[in-house]
Image (spheres, rainbow, N blue to C red):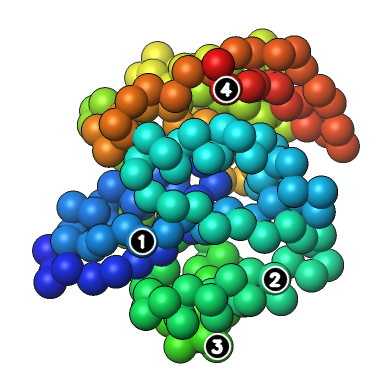
Amino acid sequence: MKKEKEFPFFASWSGGKDSCLALYYALEAGGKAEKLLTMLVDDGQKSRSHGLSIDLLEKQAESLSIPIITANTTWNNYEDNFKKLLGKLKQENINTGIFGDIDLEEHRDWVERVCSEKNLKAKLPLWKMERRKVMEKFIKLGFKAKIVVVKENKLSEQFLGKELTFDLIDELEKRNVDVCGENGEFHTVVLDGPIFNTKVEVIEKGIAKNKGYCFQNIEVK
């Protein structure tokens, strides 16, 4: 993103690498992060995308010094609940949303549509960046992240807890796995980096399996 006059924005926040790198670029472009936006499962205990606990998400937000706004939702009413949050943000004069999408057109179409319906602008700082370069840039900047979800038919549970490194990128490519996990092969949690005030300390608490996915259960220390 090009340097702009300071603009207030919210960042769609999964807690993982892509949303974090997009946030970084938006800040570098002169933006002022007013809110992180995260959708939770219907009981409000974990994020809907990455299965991160609300305690962990709040710890990330605290370290980033950015308030977090959430909504509990099922997949059936996800869009309606998402747009309700957008409406609240619009009322706070936050007119721009930052999203970590890379190159999936249907994702871009969706975020642009729901934002436009609430008179908000969607910006995608990573759009059309080569996928390996996304990972390389993330690591070179000094961000620290671990794999917390794997799709069983793509990666074994032995990858859970692995830190994102250049060696891991090479290993994923050797296994013909998309290095950004754009097809759901894996998800990550970011624990430290140049925009974090302090490292988010976590404890690994075993593995859960659900519908073809393995989840590393982690708790805040």
Across and down, in percent, residue 190 comes to 45, 31
Q: Is residue 193 left or right of residue 150?
A: left
Position of the C terminus by quadrant: top right
Q: CA distance from mark 3 to mark 4?
A: 37 Å
Q: CA distance from mark 4 to mark 1?
A: 24 Å
* Marks 3 and 4, the one that precedes in the sequence: 3
* Marks 1 and 3, the one that precedes in the sequence: 1
Q: Is residue 98 visible?
A: no
* Marks 4 and 1, the one that precedes in the sequence: 1
Disc 2 packing (10 Å; few <14; some 14–19; many ≥20):
some
Nearer to us of marks 1 and 3 is: 1
Secondary structure beneath disc 4? strand
- Pointer 1: what residue? 34
Secondary structure beneath disc 2? helix
Q: CA distance from mark 2 to mark 1?
A: 19 Å
Across and down, in percent, residue 68 comes to 50, 52
The three-letter amino acid code for the residue at tag 4 is Val
Nearer to us of marks 2 and 4 is: 4
The three-letter amino acid code for the residue at tag 2 is Asn
Residue 220: which disc? 4
Marks 4,1: beta carbons within 8 A: no
Q: CA distance from mark 2 to mark 3?
A: 13 Å
Disc 1 packing (10 Å; few <14; some 14–19; many ≥20):
some
Q: CA distance from mark 1 to mark 3?
A: 20 Å
The three-letter amino acid code for the residue at tag 1 is Glu
Secondary structure beneath disc 3? helix
Disc 4 packing (10 Å; few <14; some 14–19; many ≥20):
some
- Pointer 3: what residue? 117
Residue 81: which disc? 2
* Marks 2 and 3, the one that precedes in the sequence: 2
| Above or below, 90 relative to 176 | below
* Marks 2 and 4, the one that precedes in the sequence: 2
